[in-house]
Each structure stands twice: as structure tokens, then as C-alpha cells.
Image: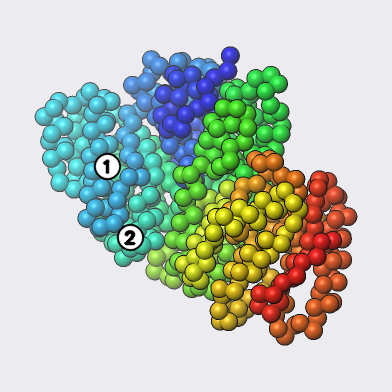
Amino acid sequence: MNKQLPILTSNFASLITGDGYYVDKTEFIQKLDSLNFSNIFFLRPRRFGKSLLLSMLEYYYGIQYKEKFDELFGEYYIGQPENTTPLKNSYHILKFNFSGIYTIAEEDTDEGFNSEIERGIQDFTTSYPLFTKEDIEKVLSVQGNVEMFKKFISLFLQKIPNGKIYILIDEYDHFTNELFAFNKEHFKDIVSRNGWVRKFYETIKIYMGEGIVDRFFATGVTPVTLDSMTSGFNVAKNITLSEEFHEMAGFTEAEVRSLILGTIYSEGAFKVDEVIDEMRSWYNGSKFTTEPVEKLYNPQLVISFLSEFKRNYEYPTKMADINVISDYKKITKILSVLPTEDSENIIEKVTTEDSILSELTLQFNNEVPYTKSDAISLLFYNGLLTIEKNVYDFISFVIPNFVIKHLYWEFLRKKFEAEFGVRYEADEVIDLISELINEGKVDRLVAYTQNIMKILSVRDFKGFGESQLKIMMLTILSKTNAYLIESERETRAGFPDILLTDSKIFKVKYQYAFELKYIPQTGLKNLATIRKEGIEQLKKYKDSDQIKMIKNLKTFLIIFYNRFEAEFIEV
């Protein structure tokens, strides 16, 4: 009997008792307990399963759930007698969630943090009926999060002198990441030696030393806040880049397959291999270590897709969850602090060459200038880039999947609209996409690109080349999900500039390989030679094994010169 496709919940018990399918991550409890470190930071991009992970830890370690252990964990790895650890159901759980704190005004941030500390303490008193109403009022009447926290611990020890607390913090850095991008001075104030965020964690550290806070697990996205308060809270281990914990959040392909078979699949309804092949391009690709590990799928994207797909076993026209698509604004936030030349170089590299080489910033120092490496690292921590491989102690970063590529293209479209007044007219884009899909022609695509280039001034064409031409064309083509778009796909014959292959979402008659050339006025005398070389290059691509297998492939050489004049040749 199949289970229910999991709803997008962060509550472990609701998922299990609601007969939802749970991708078993409980083996990592055993691994966490075997570490020499009891205080952990674990960073992953938003919507990557961190909150559900914390909830699973709460139900495993919380003493109040002891009677429900078999119901919740009985069918999973940690529920087997030989795998259960001595620490199960042995802690009082104190939870905080800092994801909802406003950062528009400084007083909002301060009040929001204090309110979350108060809410966490209130939830604790509800979960563990140790305190009288008068006790609770005494604690909550204390001004300031640090003093309130101290009062709470003091009262807890009066009730249970040998009690042990496990602190779980979700999105520890959500509000500070916002401040880091928009209000760095306030960020420095609150995480500095006398800042209230730092003082709060220093207080936790004191109780760790006294054995009252026995374990600590915090999730977040970036190490920016952690690094800023390191000397005040140097008792925790950051396992973000650990190979051993790489799969603790996110789905492996085997887990995706099991999820499909265990929920929506029925014999003959669809071919699982074909569906996974399609999902791989859109949702797979995340890697958080330089070690040779399997790339991971984004859990929310997978579940959102399967929720739509199960209705009639057809691919949805929107392959990306709108909550993830809106994250293109993060690219702007991360890059806006850099000099224009550096930010444009990053975008050009990752969108036209599909990779960028950089150091990974492990510690962010607010006392030194924000660098290009820092920006690339923040793109990585936010899931907008991922680790491909180690190259002589530098890291090659790539865009993880097609959903994230769309975010970059959306970023570029908004940038063109804001800077150059470019408008992507829906009816014209639909016409050119329809011509590509049904007629095997590129006339409208080339003409539309010409029209955009006519908007640009002479100044905009300084340094303009094939990379900029390619970016411009990618922003047009990415307005549709009809094609999977690849830039510089490797073949034995080289790297086609743009490859368009059927996304299986719509009925597509033709697929494409484009070789793009841009010739400035000073190079027009070489037009015939460049044309000949481009044709020969496309012929080599067509003969390569990787391209030969693409059905109904159309190959075009597209040349722009004299700013926006163009010609195209089918090869």
C-alpha cells in the first residue's frame, strides 16, 4: 500500500502519523551521537529539508515523546533496536526559530529576536508542565533576552537540578543575513563583542560549560553570523562541508526513486526512469563538499513537482516552485555590494561558461573589504552555485540545475529592463518560440535579438562580444520551459554555444544547436573567414556522438556585426 506524497511540512510527527512518505534520514542521528562534538552548526540553502531535520531530532531526543517512539520511528533505521542510541528521549528540548524576524527597522529586529526567545520559552513551559503560572510570569516579565534566558535556566534548575537541555535553533542567521546585505553597521553592532546576538550565544556557551545545555544543533544558510561571533561562541562544530553528513538534507537519486515508487506510482501509469531523467536536469546537482559524493536533489522542488505530476501523469508547464523562483532577488543582493566589473564577470562566467573558479570563503571578516570570492561563496551557501570539483585548492563552482539557471536568466532580464529599458513583449516572444518549436526556423529569434541590440547605445557596445550576445539570447530563450537550454555543452568536437533540447513539457518538433559569432567593425574584413570557420565547427558538432543522438536537430550559425546587423546559416 503506497503512502501519501509528503506535504511540505516541517513537523516530523504530522508527517509520520499522517501516513506521509518520509525519506529516512534517521541514520544521521547515530552519526551525530558518535561525534566528539555535541554542539553543531549545519548550513544548507533554504527549503532543503533543514526544518524537518530539526523536528526529527526533537521527536527523537525529547523526553515527552518517549511513549510515542515506536509509532514515530519504528519503521525507520534509528527505530531498530540495534541502531537506537543511548540518548533517545533523554532531553528537555528548547527550540527557537529566527526565520520570521523583520529587519526593515533596527528596533523591529531587536524586538523580533526578543519575542522569539520569549516564544521559545513559552513553548517549553507548555511541553514540560514544570512551572506554575506565577513562575512563567516571573520569567517572561524580565527585560532583555539574555536576562530572560538566565532567569529561565535558573528556574529550570530549581525544578530539575540535574536536568539536561538540548537547544535546537532553526535559521539562526536568517535575519542577520538580511542585515549583512542591507545594514552592515547594525549587523556589526549586534554580533560584535557587546552586541545582543553575541551576548545571547555567549550565555548559551556558559550553560554548555556548566553541563546544563548538553547538546546544541543550529541550522542556517551562511556562516557569516557564525564567523562574526566565533570568539564568543567557539564551542560548536560546523559540519556543513563534511562528506559524512552530505546527505543529511536533500535527496539522493535512489531516495527520489523510492519516493516515487512508494507514493504516486502504479503499474503501467508512467515510466519511472523517464521521469527521473527529466527531473535530474531540473532539480538535481547540489554538492556541498569537494569530496567525490553523489549530487543531491532539492527536496521542495521534487515534492512540488510530484504533487503536480500525479494528477494526470503529465509534466506541469511550470517546473519550478514559485517560492524558489522568487529567490532570483538574492543574486542581486549578493552581487550589488561588488564593483560592477566584478559582478558582471561573475554573471558572465556562470551563465556563458557554466563554471567559475574561486576560493571558498570559510570565514567572513567584516573588518576587510567584501571580495569577489566572498560573493561567489555566498552564492554557493545560498544554493545558487554548487561545488563541481577541487582544482589545485581552488574550487570550480557551477550552477546546480535548470531551475537555478532560470533564476540567473530572470536576474539578467530584470537587469536589462532596468538599465537599458529593454522590454520582453510576451506576444513577440511567443511567436518566436512557436516558430522554433513548430517550423524549425530562427528568423524571429534573430530579429528579436536585433531589436534588443538596437536599444543599446554605442557606449554599451564597448567591450561587447560573443559572451554578451549569448547572454542576451539566453534571456529570450529562457522565457519558455519548452527547451532545456545548455551553454557550452562539452562534446568531443568542442562546445556548442547554445544547445536547445526538448524538455518534454510541450510537443517540440525541432531541437537546436547554435554557434554564435559577433564581429566588431574592426573585424569585418574577416567575415568570410569567420563564416567558414563557424560552418566547419558546426559540422564537427553534428558528427560528435553527443549531438548525433539528438533527434530532429537543426544547427545554425548566427553572426552579428555592425552592432546589430545579422545573418544566419543553417548547416
- The reply to whether residue 414 is in sight is yes
Q: Residue 397, position in %: x, y?
A: 62, 57
Residue 17 appears left or right of 273: left
Cα separation, mark 1 vs mark 2, equals 18 Å
Residue count near mark 2 (Cα–Cα under 10 Å), binned few <14, some 14–19, many ≥20: many
Residue 429 x/y as whole percent: 60, 56
Task: Give x and y (percent) for residue 275.
Answer: 67, 34
Q: Quadrant of the rendered structure where residue 181 is?
A: bottom left
- The local crowd at label 1, few if under 14, some if 14 to 19, many if 20 or more residues have their Cα within 10 Å, is some
Q: Is residue 64 left or right of residue 485?
A: left
* In front of the other: 181 or 454: 454
SS label for mark 2: helix
Task: Classify 69 as above or below 107.
Answer: above
Colouring of the image: rainbow
Residue corresponding to mark 2: 187
The residue nearer to you, when weighing 107 against 232, is 107
Amino acid carrying label 1: it is: Glu
Position above or below: 89 against 201: above
* Residue occupying image coordinates x 56% and y 73%: 455
Callouts 1 and 2 close, C-beta under 8 Å? no
- In the figure, is residue 43 to the left or right of 143? right
Three-letter amino acid code at disc 2?
A: Phe
| Residue occupying image coordinates x 23% and y 43% | 115
- Whether residue 230 can be seen here: no
Rendered-image quadrant of the N terminus: top right
Q: Which residue is mark 1?
A: 116
Judge whether 48 appears above or below 394 on screen. above
Give the camera-side residue of 557 and 408. 557
Dot 1 or dot 2: first in sequence order is 1
Residue that appears at 16% across and 38% down? 140
